[in-house]
Amino acid sequence: EIITNSGTISITLLKKEAPGTVLNFVQLAESGYYENKLVHRVVPNFVIQGGGNRGDGYGSLDYTIRSEVGPLYYDRSGLVGIASAGLHTESQQWFITLRPALHLNGRYTIFGRLDSGFDIVKDIRRGEVIKSIKITR
C-alpha cells in the first residue's frame, strides 16, 4: 500500500516477473526510505512518478539494479514501473501509468500493478507527499 495525503493506493508486486526490482522496492519501503518523499513528476494522461531522494527527480542512491524487462508490456493503465536512465541504471524512483504507454516496452521494468486507488492516482498533483509504503505479506 502506498499511503499518500490523498489516500491509499493498493498495488500487487510482481515478484515472479521482476524479483530483483521487487526485492529492492520492498527493502526500501521496509527501511522507511519512502516516508515523506514526494510525487515529483505528474504528466497528465501518462504517469505519476515519485520516490526520488531529492524530491525533484534528480539524484539516485549509491547503487543501481539490473533491468528486468519483458515479458510484460505497458499495455494498460495502472502498471508500476521503475524509473531509469537506461538499461541497468534503476534504483529507487517508481512510476504508475495513467494509460497504455507502449513506447516504454523493453526499456522500463514493470514490477507491480494497481489493485485499487486509480481514482486517487488520477487526482495526484506534483508535490503530493508519500507518507509511507506498507508491505503486506
Image: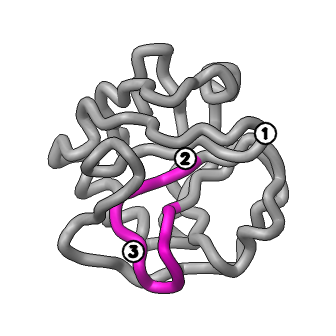
**Neighbourhood count class around disc 3 (C-alpha, 10 Å): few under 14, some 14–19, many 20 upward:** some
Residue 59 relative to residue 116: left or right: left
Please name the residue shown 32% across and 65% down the image: 24
Look at the image and give the residue range highlighted in magenta: 82-95
Q: Amino acid at mark 3?
A: Gly
Please name the residue shown 60% across and 71% down the image: 108
Give the residue number, with chain letter if any, for mark 3.
Answer: 20
**Residue 9 marker:** none
Give the residue number, with chain letter if any, for mark 1.
Answer: 45
Given residues 48 and 117, the one toward you in this image is 48
Separation of residues labelled 2 and 1 (CA atoms):
22 Å
Circle 2 sits in a helix, a strand or a loop, which is it? strand
Mark 1 or mark 3: name the one nearer the start of the chain.
3
Given residues 93 and 69, the one toward you in this image is 93
**Residue 12 marker:** 2
Helix, strand or loop: magenta stretch: loop
Given residues 112 and 5, the one toward you in this image is 5
Circle 3 sits in a helix, a strand or a loop, which is it? helix
